[in-house]
Structures are given as C-alpha cells and as structure tokens.
Image (cartoon, rainbow, N blue to C red):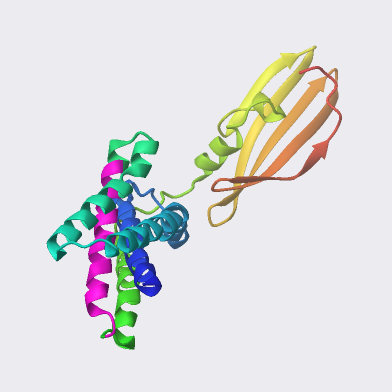
Amino acid sequence: MLLRKLASAYMVSALVIIFFLLSSIHVTSPGSTLFDFYAAVLIFSLYVVPIVFIYGAGVSALVEVVLGKLRMNVTMKLLLQVVLHAVFGSVLGIIVDSKLFCLYGTIAAVLFLLFDNLLCKLEGRIQAKGWLIWIASPLVILVCLQIYNQSITPPLPPFTEKDAVEFATSGKGTVIDYFPKQVGTRVMTIDGYRVERETRVAKTNKEEYEVTFIEKWEKDGVTGQHSYNYSVSRGSMTANGGGGDRIPYSR
C-alpha cells in the first residue's frame, strides 16, 4: 500500500504544480529566465508536496483501512471513498476560508483516489518500464511547459545610458539628491560660491555604465572639485571611488 500511496501522491503533486504553473504563465515578466521558472516550481513544491504526501496520502490510507473493515458492496465502497476523499480534500480550504482552495483540494483528493485505484488494479503487473513512464511523464510535461514559457517570454528592453542615470538617481536621502536627474549641469549660488553640479555617464561594457556626479565651486578665484563615481548595471549600483576637495559650504 505504501508504494501505491507514494506513487499516487507523486502524480497528484506534479499535476497540481503544473496546474499552478499554467495559471501563472500568462503573467510571466519580461526577461524571465530558466532559473525563474524552476524557482517557481520549487516554491509551489514547498507548499504542495508536504500537503499531498503527508496529509493526502495519510488520509487516503486511513480511509482505505477503515472501509476495508466494513462489509459493503463495491459500488457503495467506491462512493464512500469518493465522498470521504472530497470532504477531507476540502478541509484546508475551509481552514483558510477559501472556496477556491476548497475546490482545488477536492479535485486533488479525487484525482488521488483515481490514481490510487488505477495502481491498485495494476498492482503486481507494472514492470520497471511502467514505473519509469509513471515517474517521467510529469517531468516531460514540466520541461515542455518550461520551453513554451521561454518561447512566449518577451525579452528585456535594452538597458540604456538614460536607464543607468535614472537608476543611479532613484534613491533618496544621499548626496546624489543634489545632482541633476539626467545627464547635464546645474548651476547655482551657495554662500557666495558659484556651484556647478554635473551628472555624467559613460559606457564601460555591454549594459554597464559609469555614472559620475561632479561638483565644482568657485569664489574669489578659489576653486575646488569633488566627485562621486558609481558602476551601474541593470538592477545594481556599486560605489566606484571618487573624492576631491572638501566642500567649503553647507548644502
């Protein structure tokens, strides 16, 4: 019985995970990778597998043992199996107060029963090749689903110099707040100093840029300069040196 329950739990878990993946494919983000797909598989598995293997298989085994002790015809026994599996399958949905989860749980429980009864009828007749097909079929579907997902995933748009500057200046509460939010220069007067603040960007590699913030000042023939350099790529910014004279005025 144990092997049969585990095999049924494996198939139901796989089908539930595939169902959730199918439900989420239409909202795939641009640039989604192979890692993103299988990360989603792992996340779904963390919830689905323990519930099906521990709760689902345990309840199914208990129902089978209890009904096996009762005298009844085959039709009545099957009917009770369906009802009890459906009821226990909906319990988690009732706990979290979700009609949708009740429906999912009920369907998964009935599927478990169908696979379990199928394996029960084939018990002793399934050879190694049959078990291999049983194990491999959900994996093949999963790989096909991943290939399809990648085929419909739109590519990320190019990461441009403008994007790099926007990302570098998107934060709040730093000295970068004082500089232009786009490439260019801003001139102002602070405490009698003529202050020039400039934002520059230069490409260093494919979709990698160096964004530099330069502050210059002049007063009565005395000049100074201070700069801040950052390496910027898609979703990442790293301080890359800088320095210069001490700023003589209050910002």
Label tally: 0
Q: Quadrant of the N terminus?
A: bottom left
Q: Nearer the viewer, residue 98 or 68?
A: 68
Q: Residue at x 61, y 31 (%)?
A: 171
Q: Residue at x 34, y 87 (%)?
A: 128
Query: Magenta residues, as a range?
Result: 102-124
Magenta region includes residue 171? no
Q: Residue at x 31, y 62 (%)?
A: 64
Q: Residue at x 35, y 71 (%)?
A: 7
Residue 99 placement, left or right of 44: left
Q: Residue furthest top?
A: 191
Up/down of 197 relative to 68, above or below: above
Residue 36 placement, left or right of 242: left
Q: Position of residue 111 (x, y in %)?
A: 25, 59
* Residue 225 shows in this picture: yes
Q: Nearer the viewer, residue 160 or 215?
A: 160
Secondary structure mostly seen in magenta is helix
Q: Position of residue 250 (x, y in %)?
A: 80, 17
Q: Position of residue 159 (x, y in %)?
A: 48, 48
Q: Position of residue 167 (x, y in %)?
A: 56, 38
Residue 80 placement, left or right of 45: left
Q: Quadrant of the C terminus?
A: top right
Up/down of 190 relative to 43, above or below: above
* Residue 146 shows in this picture: no
Up/down of 120 relative to 52, above or below: below
Q: Nearer the viewer, residue 25 or 161?
A: 25
